[in-house]
Image (spheres, grey):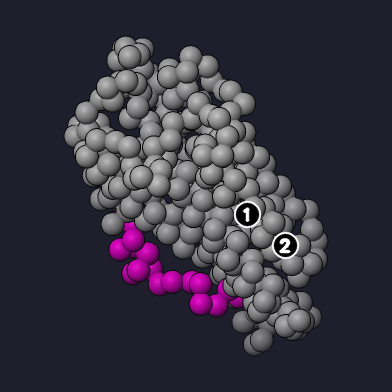
Amino acid sequence: MPQQKPATRPSAGLRPGRGGLGSIAVITFILIAVAQYMIFMYVPDDATLGLIQRIFYFHVASAWNALLAFGVVFVASILYLAKGERRYDALAYSSAEIGVLFTSLVLITGPIWGKISWNQWWTWDPRLTTTLILWFIYVAYLLIRMAADEPEKRARFAAVFGILGFIDVPIVFFSIRWWRTIHPVVISWQGAAMEKSMLQTMIVSFVAFSFLFVYLLINRLRVEAMQDEVAQLKERLQGTR
Amino acid sequence: MPSAAKALPYLFAAYTVIWVVVFGYTLSIGARQRKLAQDLELIKSAVEKRAN
């Protein structure tokens, strides 16, 4: 087993400069503005669902971000257990927080869509249920991190939880293919079942949200790096007493 | 098809929630960074004072 690095080690290599972050912020803003224009001005109403279908673009993009975030947690957790470097623990923690944020958005916007489309806020459909379980898993991950006192033990335990929790991600994705469901199947192995302008709008929304994820992740990592720096300086201060 | 008049408030609510949550989270990260930057300045000056 690799030797554990001190948990208060600054998250070196994960703290980008302000210039790069500014560029990502500008690109994200422009892409989101374009996506919003396409959603409200460019794309036509859905023939079956009408106006309410326009929720779908950011709902699906939020789901994409959640899966992306939990994928990062999974990879970073494996790297932490393999290398024992604090930066991977910081990456997993930051990404999990953002993943919970976007899963929450999926769980809020989905029922708003469902109230109009299905005439009910919630149903124990496989896709909805597995997504709710996913949210609980990663909320538990965040709570575990807050509860454990010893930093290295906390990081190792969280890494194991981050790897095991990822098991639910493919289950969420394939739930609408494995079980009978009333949730729409938009993207299948045969491609995307939608009109061309809708597909274009969805792709722009996906790209915009991917940039939003990167922007939030870099900012969140900066918080971790600063916390490490504060902890290290406090240790130095106590050492000189 | 559900009527546009019935769907519009729900559509508005969905996008409002998305932007309030995303902006709220972005602002909370910014607030955490500002607080940590202040802490860093304080601790750095304390470390320098002790070193001198």
Residue of label 1 = A166
Q: Chain of mark 1?
A: A
**Quadrant position of residue A117:** top left
Residue A98 in sight: no
Left or right: residue A54 compared with residue A174:
left
Give, as a three-letter code, the residue at label 1: Phe
Percent x, y of residue B7: 36, 17
The numbered mark at residue A112 is none
Q: Chain of mark 2?
A: A
Give, as a three-letter code, the residue at label 2: Val
Magenta span contains residue A10: yes
Q: Nearer the viewer, residue B23 or A92?
A: A92
| Quadrant placement of the C terminus of chain A | bottom right
Residue of label 2 = A160
Q: Dot 2, how many residues are within 10 Å of its Cα: few (below 14), some (14-19), or many (20+)?
A: some
Which residues fall within the magenta stretch? A8-26
Left or right: residue A203 compared with residue A169:
left
